[in-house]
Image (spheres, grey):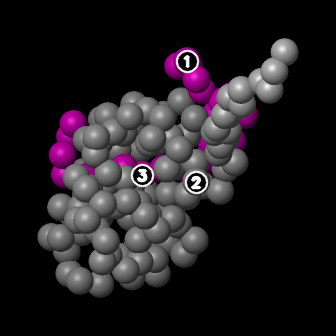
Amino acid sequence: MQIGVETSRAVESKRIFVVDDDDITRAILQFMLQDENETHDLPTLNDAFAKGQPDLLLLGISIVQSWEPGLLETVREQWPGTRILIIAGTDRETATRPGAHGVLARPFTVESVRQKVDIQLGRAVPSLIQLQLVPSSGG
């Protein structure tokens, strides 16, 4: 197990598919998510369809762009209830992608990737509390 892994999430074992034509992207995301989830990295969407239904699909922007325009609708029909995050270089690349639930934008950090994934899986994400120091009034 890695440092910072929530053991209750590892036992819960949500199923995540990372589908991208870039081997390095798949490996990085699989490594970041494997301790808290059942994570599979797959080079094609057809490989993913053959594997069964995930709870969350991380789908590379290049795959979305190379398929027909109705790809995300096809995924939603094939896997009802599966959440979809588009792996992209920036949020602007996928701003107009109907059917996706969000964007996983580069650069990747363990914290940002896990937080985005946890939100999509409906897990509670700890929020930060900002504290403000108030000067004492006298004596």
Q: Residue 102 occupies which quadrant of the picture?
A: bottom left
State the residue in front, 38 or 111.
111
Three-letter code for the amino acid on which mark 1 is drawn? Ile
Three-letter code for the amino acid on which mark 2 is drawn? Ile
Question: Whole-Å distance between the Cαs marked 2 and 3?
Answer: 16 Å
> Magenta segment range?
1-24
From the image, tell me which residue sits under label 3: 17
From the image, tell me which residue sits under label 2: 119
Mark 3 vs mark 1, foreground winner is 1
Secondary structure under the numbered disc 1 in the rendered image:
loop
Residue at the image point whose x is 25% and y is 56% from the top: 90
Secondary structure under the numbered disc 3 in the rendered image:
strand
Q: Residue 109 occupies which quadrant of the picture?
A: top left
From the image, tell me which residue sits under label 1: 3
Secondary structure under the numbered disc 2 in the rendered image:
helix
- Percent position of residue 67, x then y: 19, 74
Earlier in the chain: of badge 2 and badge 3, it is 3
Find the residue positioned furthest to the front: 138
Residue at the image point whose x is 33% and y is 39% from the top: 108
Three-letter code for the amino acid on which mark 3 is drawn? Phe
Mark 2 vs mark 3, foreground winner is 2
- Percent position of residue 20, x then y: 25, 52
